[in-house]
Image (cartoon, rainbow, N blue to C red):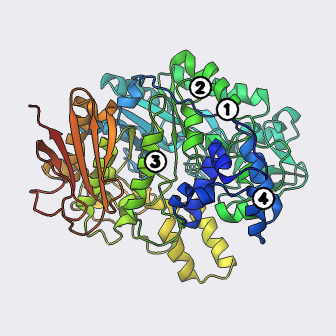
Amino acid sequence: MNKKISLNSKIKDLIALPIGHDIVFRLFLQTGFSFSLLKNPLILNIKLKHLASLAKKVPLSFFETIINLVNSELEQPWEDNSPIKKTWWKEAVFYQIYPRSFKDSNGDGIGDIQGIISELDTLKDLGIDCLWLSPIYDSPNDDNGYDIRDYRNIMKEFGTMEDVEMLISELKKRDMKIIMDLVVNHTSDEHPWFQAALKGDKEKQDYYIFKDNPNNWTSFFSGSAWRYFKEIDKYALKLFSSKQMDLNWDNPKLRKEVVDIVTFWLKKGIDGFRMDVINYISKNPNLPNGDELIGKLVGFTGMEHYFYGPNLTKYLSKLRKEAFEPYQGFNVGETPGIGTQLGKLLTGDYRNIMDLTFSFDHLETPGKVRFDDYRYDLNFYKLYLIENQRAFTNRYWMSLFVDNHDNPRFISKIDPSHNYRNQLAKNINMILLTLKGTPFFYQGQEIGMTNNEFKSMTDIRDVESINKYQELLETGKSEKDAFEIILAGTRDHTRTPMQWTSEVYGGFSKSLPWIIGHQDLTSTNIKVQQKQDDSIYNFTKELIKYRKDNQTLIYGDIEFINEKTKDYFIYKRKDEKNEYLIEINLIDKKQKRIVSTDGYELIFSNIKELEEQMTPYEANLYKKIKT
Ligand code: ISL
Ligand code: CA
């Protein structure tokens, strides 16, 4: 246990505590300062009170808020030499399906469960071990299923419970696994609990967070985080859309409901859950106003009061014990705002809280947010990876991902004109498959799908984008400028139909899909790429297979080479048996080779034949020749 900090403490004391560490790193990311400042002893020894008096414009309350937050977690992640515990989910390759956009079996333009079943052989062929399905439960679809009305029923458009049971058994036949999405920070306002609450049911009112007067917290989807209900003359908390009502985890009855939901599904034979915004479930019970400056820095006011709330680890450990452990269920928490040290505290194998977290710190370069139009520099991804690969050892394990349903396509951020799409898609997939951690691919990543050229707001479906567009107009932006901003960051980029063939609508559906894709269909589809030896699909498939057959790439140690040299990412994976060398060009230019590969044989490359220089975004995997 560490000591609490105060205004008298130094910056080094602050970053020695897990929350302090993660916040300071976050601030550096947000403001674009260089991390190297944090190695400078002059900086490390500045006292917080001196920093406070230097930063005259910053109110003291800002520092006090941060200090309180940092003092709320004094535990340090254990560091010891215990060997990695081998488990299926460390060896597995995961694949996220966005069911609405994956495959339509009945021609209504909406993906469905039977559509997924019809493509299981394809996923098996690719080498996928475990699927993650975004929500398929009954929902009025305000946020595409992340607003659940009934946790034990299936969205009509997607099919029936029988379809889901069939999916589970078809997966078992193929020796594949499945996790589902557990969205329990909030329910739909149409959930019977909330409806009963509005009718005056006191017990159900206590399932949610009602207040007579709103505080200053803001919603992730624009505006206030509170919605007024005249039925009972109260405000209800909704951190996301106006139809996503936050649940009150401080109520033991609600927590028991969640245990029952998890048990219901694990009993059905699923293998675990991805837990939506799970680090937001425990709110500071006093619901104090958020610090305005922190709000400005992170983009949302109030976060410090719930992103790592007072009872988070307690509630999660209990959930783990009561619901997951009896079925050996796996879980990965979606944890926005959780950095390296808190991530370790949440996932350490001795803690029994959760197995993995999804951290998002790598998705934007310093100083940038998702709606900025800019080119992502892969050197930043390298820094993030080195920091985290070093931290997640022994008792800790990392999740590795770049694409998901909440972000534009990663390759489009790096190379917006897609000059090197083929090369780059393979490059990124190689990084994900050769680092230490569990790779999560998102549908379409195996064929190099890119951002979509939406033409106008009528093409946009996402509630976040629609709200944001309105907000931008209200703050005086022109329609054109507002649309440009939406285009840079909309989550719809990854929600366009999966491309199976070069037929109309990419073979996703026989009729007009619910959202339109305007991407190249001729070369970016599964069917074409399956037949092409050097396609992104086959490259990824072969690499997945290779990783599976060569456990050094899973459990082996990692060592970084020429780490400080910009524009290169070079590392080794090794154990007593084998040694691999991975050589990555991080930029769209030729550059010289800086490591010798004498004594190694080339196993994989994203180019046909190596030249003297490395070509743009070149990526090679070599194996040491045994003597
Ligand atoms: O996109 C964001 C807001 O700018 C992210 O904060 C995102 O909303 C956050 O990662 C939470 O995402 C998850 O919960 C949301 C849902 O809309 C997302 O699709 C889901 O992945 C609410 O359930
Ligand atoms: Ca359908």
Alpha carbons under labels 2 and 1: distance apart:
9 Å
Image coordinates for residue 224, horizontal then vertical, percent: 76, 61
Q: Is residue 507 visible?
A: no
> Which kind of residue does numbered mark 4 sit on?
Lys
Of badges 2 and 3, nearer the viewer stands: 3
Which of the two labelled residues, at mark 2 and mark 3, occupies the earlier sequence position?
A: 2
Which of the two labelled residues, at mark 3 and mark 1, occupies the earlier sequence position?
A: 1
Of badges 3 and 4, nearer the viewer stands: 4
- Say left or right for 221 vs 349: right
Question: Does the residue at mark 2 contact the one at mark 1 (Cβ under 8 Å)?
Answer: yes
Residue wearing tag 4:
49
Which element type, helix, strand or loop, lies under badge 2? loop
Of badges 1 and 4, nearer the viewer stands: 4
Which of the two labelled residues, at mark 2 and mark 1, occupies the earlier sequence position?
A: 1
Q: Residues within 10 Å of mark 1 (few under 14, many from 20)?
A: some
Which of the two labelled residues, at mark 3 and mark 4, occupies the earlier sequence position?
A: 4
Question: Does the residue at mark 2 contact the one at mark 3 (Cβ under 8 Å)?
Answer: no
Q: Which disc, if any, is residue 108? A: none
Residue wearing tag 2:
351
Residue wearing tag 1:
313
Residue wearing tag 3:
387
